[in-house]
Every structure is written in structure tokens, then in C-alpha cells.
Image: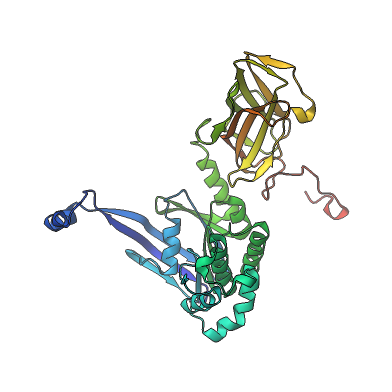
């Protein structure tokens, strides 16, 4: 085997589950053998076989409980397979529970050396990396304080900085890229790209599909502990998202609500060009966002507004009727609907949440706010783009590009 290589052969990880409750030591002893007979076997992973080449970046996707983190811990050697074999070659940096080896009574400086020792580095080797780790973590003046005085963000950032700067052969990453502010996240992503470009093997677990598209060459789709699909990132992600979206509730399944209540947003719909309700649209489609409302009393100069969010909580846009000069005089013990028609939706593939609100003319008084009350999905359309949240809708031109389509 070569450094950075990972081989999983028919790996299974199982646990015994005892259905009967035991409240006292006496019951546990009396029922010991009966418990052994009634124990059930739960398989977190079963029959998983993978060969990951040195320098490959592979992402693990699947719903919660599908076995992603279990597989990552098995590769790291934290979990021993119940059956099959997991073999790795080279130094591993597991970014699974950052800072798990830190001693809260020790300073950040001492914990850098302690964490390095746990990863197999000598004190001299860590001394050569120390300043780079501190600079990356941006902890500077705090590095000699006991880590028990760190905020949770500082704690994780130090662990992240140690793990990402020891330059291992294999990096195992489990949902840890959302640490720090936007600038720190950018640095982390750049560092991962540098490691990938330098031939390091990366195994990534994330629910953020854009991140997976950017960082991984291959995607392994796990379902109930079984490897369902393995292939190029774009192909597997598209198939996974398409299937994941088929069972979504149309409205009111999540989100929050507040307001004074004199007027209300009763229902939110996403409609296609024929005014038919849909849960899934494509980039470039004509889409109508319809907001059904009702009121119990006279409301002067009402304002309707909406917002779109990514699943990560990024606010994509937030138009309202006042901005475009649509100011009805009033609504009075009435009901109806207001549409926002988008002739060419330029959202890129992904899942989005819709918020809708009904306000007074100043938009400071909220009659009703339905926050992230409806979720819908966008699939590939025209233009066919995959990075970011929105398309500019532009056209590439130039002498060198003429006649290339």
C-alpha cells in the first residue's frame, strides 16, 4: 500500500441493543442470561467496501443515521469493525471531534504540543509548526491562557488549526468547516484545496452540497449503513438530492411564527407558469410565489414581504411590495392573495426556505411573520450552473469561444 491509501473490505459495525429496562443491580444479575438471549443486533454499517486512492477527495453523504460518522470513525481507527477489515496507510489527522484531546487546565500552547504528540509528532516537529498553527487560529494573545477559559469557538479553532497544519497523509473531516467567522472559513477552505492539490487524501462528511461539489472528486452515498451509490460527485449529488426531495411536506412542516395577529399569512405556495402548486422547479423556470392572507380589521397601507434562505441559513434575497411602490390603501376584514411572479428564476440547484410577512407601512410593526415556513427545491435548468446560490444569467463570449458549442 501507498501512503494515503484506504481500503475497506466488507466492513460492518454492529451493536447489541437490549429492549428490556433494568432499574436495579439485582434485576441486572437475575436477568443476565435472559438479556443475552433477547439482545438484538443493530448494524450501523454493513457490507461496505471502498478503495480510496492516495490523493483522492471523497465525500460521504446520506441522511442522519445513515452511517457516515461511523464509517469515518472506523477509518480513523476509533471504532473496530465487527466484521470485515479497514486498512489505512500513512499518518491520519481525524477532524471529527476537534480538541477532544485537549486538557482544559493546560494553556493553548501546551495543548498544541499535546495534540501533536497524540497525532504522532515529536516536540521538535511541533515546534517547527507552532507559529503557523497559532497564526492560522488567530488566537495570538490567548495562546498562553488555559483553554478552559476559551470560548467554544476559540477551542474548536485551535483544534482545527492543529489538525489542518500537521500535513497528514489522510484527513478525515466531519462537519467541522463551519468554525469561526466567514474569513476564517475561507482560510480553511483554501487550506483544504491546497492539501488536495498537494496529493493528500481527504474523506469528508457534510450536508452542504456546494462544499462537497467544490472539495470532492467522488461521493459515496450511504443509506441505513449500506453503500448505495459510489461515483463522480456531480452525478451522485444530483441523484441524492432528487430522491431526497420527493417526500417533502408542502407547508407548515417547520419554521416559526410571530406577530400581532390582526392580519395573517394563511398559506404560502410555489406555483409553476400554469399556476399549479409545485415542490420542485428548475433554474430558469417561471415561478410564482403566492401568499394567501386574511385580516380581522382594517389595516392601512399593508406591506407584503418575503425572504429566501438556504438550508444553512444564508439570506439570499428579501423583496417587499413597498420597495416597488405597490401601496394599497387598506385591507378590511378581508382575505385574498398576493403573488410575486419571477419570469426567470436564477436560483441555482439546492433547497431553499421561504419566509413571508405582513407589515405596516413602516415595516417595523409585524402583523404576521411566517419564518422559513415552506421549503422547495431547485434542480438544474438553464443556465446549467452549479456553484453558489444564484446565476448572473450572463453569456460567455469571445473570439476563442466562437464555434465551440
Identify the residue shown where x is 63% and y is 72%: 141
- Give the farthest residue toward the right: 399
Position of residue 73 relative to residue 134, above or below, is: above
- Give the farthest residue toward the top: 333
- Pick the front one: 228 or 255: 255
Q: Position of residue 159 (x, y in %)?
A: 54, 68
- Pick the front one: 21 or 4: 21
Q: Position of residue 38 (x, y in %)?
A: 19, 51
Specify whether 326 is left or right of 54.
Answer: right
- Give the farthest residue toward the left: 30
Position of residue 352 relative to residue 179, above or below, is: above
- Pick the front one: 195 or 338: 338
Specify the color scheme.
Answer: rainbow
Q: How many marks?
A: 0
- In this view of the protein, can residue 151 be seen by the observer? yes
Identify the residue shown where x is 54% and y is 75%: 112
Amino acid at each position: 500500500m501507498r501512503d494515503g491509501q484506504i481500503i475497506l473490505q466488507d466492513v460492518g459495525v454492529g451493536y447489541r441493543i437490549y429492549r428490556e429496562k433494568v432499574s436495579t443491580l439485582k434485576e441486572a444479575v437475575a436477568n443476565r442470561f435472559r438479556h443475552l438471549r433477547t439482545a438484538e443486533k443493530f448494524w450501523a454499517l454493513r457490507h461496505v467496501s471502498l478503495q480510496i486512492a492516495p490523493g483522492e477527495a471523497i465525500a460521504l453523504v446520506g441522511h442522519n443515521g445513515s452511517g457516515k460518522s461511523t464509517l469515518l470513525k472506523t477509518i480513523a481507527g476509533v471504532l473496530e469493525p465487527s466484521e470485515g477489515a479497514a486498512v489505512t496507510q500513512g499518518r491520519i489527522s481525524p477532524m471529527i471531534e476537534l480538541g477532544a484531546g485537549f486538557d482544559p487546565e493546560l494553556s493553548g500552547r501546551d495543548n498544541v504540543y499535546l495534540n501533536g504528540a497524540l497525532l504522532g509528532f515529536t516536540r521538535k516537529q511541533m515546534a517547527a509548526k507552532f507559529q503557523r498553527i497559532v497564526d492560522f487560529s488567530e488566537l495570538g494573545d490567548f495562546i498562553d491562557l488555559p483553554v478552559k477559559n476559551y470560548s467554544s469557538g476559540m477551542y474548536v479553532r485551535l483544534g482545527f488549526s492543529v489538525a489542518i497544519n500537521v500535513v497528514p497523509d489522510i484527513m478525515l473531516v466531519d462537519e467541522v468547516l463551519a468554525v469561526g467567522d466567514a474569513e476564517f472559513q475561507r482560510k480553511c477552505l483554501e487550506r483544504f484545496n491546497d492539501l488536495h492539490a498537494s496529493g493528500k487524501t481527504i474523506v469528508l462528511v457534510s450536508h452542504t452540497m456546494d462544499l462537497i461539489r467544490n472539495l470532492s472528486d467522488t461521493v459515496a452515498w450511504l443509506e441505513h449503513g449500506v453503500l448505495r451509490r459510489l461515483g463522480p460527485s456531480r452525478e451522485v449529488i444530483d441523484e441524492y438530492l432528487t430522491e431526497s426531495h420527493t417526500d417533502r411536506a408542502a407547508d407548515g412542516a417547520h419554521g416559526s411564527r410571530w406577530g400581532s395577529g390582526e392580519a395573517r399569512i394563511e398559506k404560502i405556495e410555489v406555483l409553476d407558469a400554469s399556476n399549479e402548486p409545485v415542490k420542485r422547479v428548475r433554474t430558469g423556470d417561471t415561478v410564482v410565489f403566492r401568499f394567501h392572507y386574511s385580516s380581522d380589521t382594517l389595516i392601512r397601507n399593508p406591506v407584503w414581504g418575503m425572504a429566501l434562505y438556504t438550508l444553512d441559513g444564508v439570506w439570499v434575497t428579501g423583496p417587499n411590495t413597498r420597495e416597488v411602490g405597490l401601496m394599497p390603501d387598506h385591507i378590511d376584514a378581508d382575505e385574498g392573495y398576493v403573488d410575486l411572479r419571477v419570469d426567470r428564476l436564477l436560483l441555482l440547484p439546492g433547497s431553499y426556505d421561504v419566509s413571508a410577512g405582513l407589515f405596516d407601512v413602516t415595516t417595523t410593526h409585524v402583523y404576521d411573520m411566517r419564518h422559513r415556513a415552506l421549503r422547495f427545491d431547485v434542480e438544474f435548468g438553464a443556465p446549467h450552473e452549479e456553484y453558489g446560490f444564484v446565476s448572473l444569467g450572463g453569456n460567455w463570449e469571445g473570439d476563442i469561444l466562437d464555434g465551440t458549442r
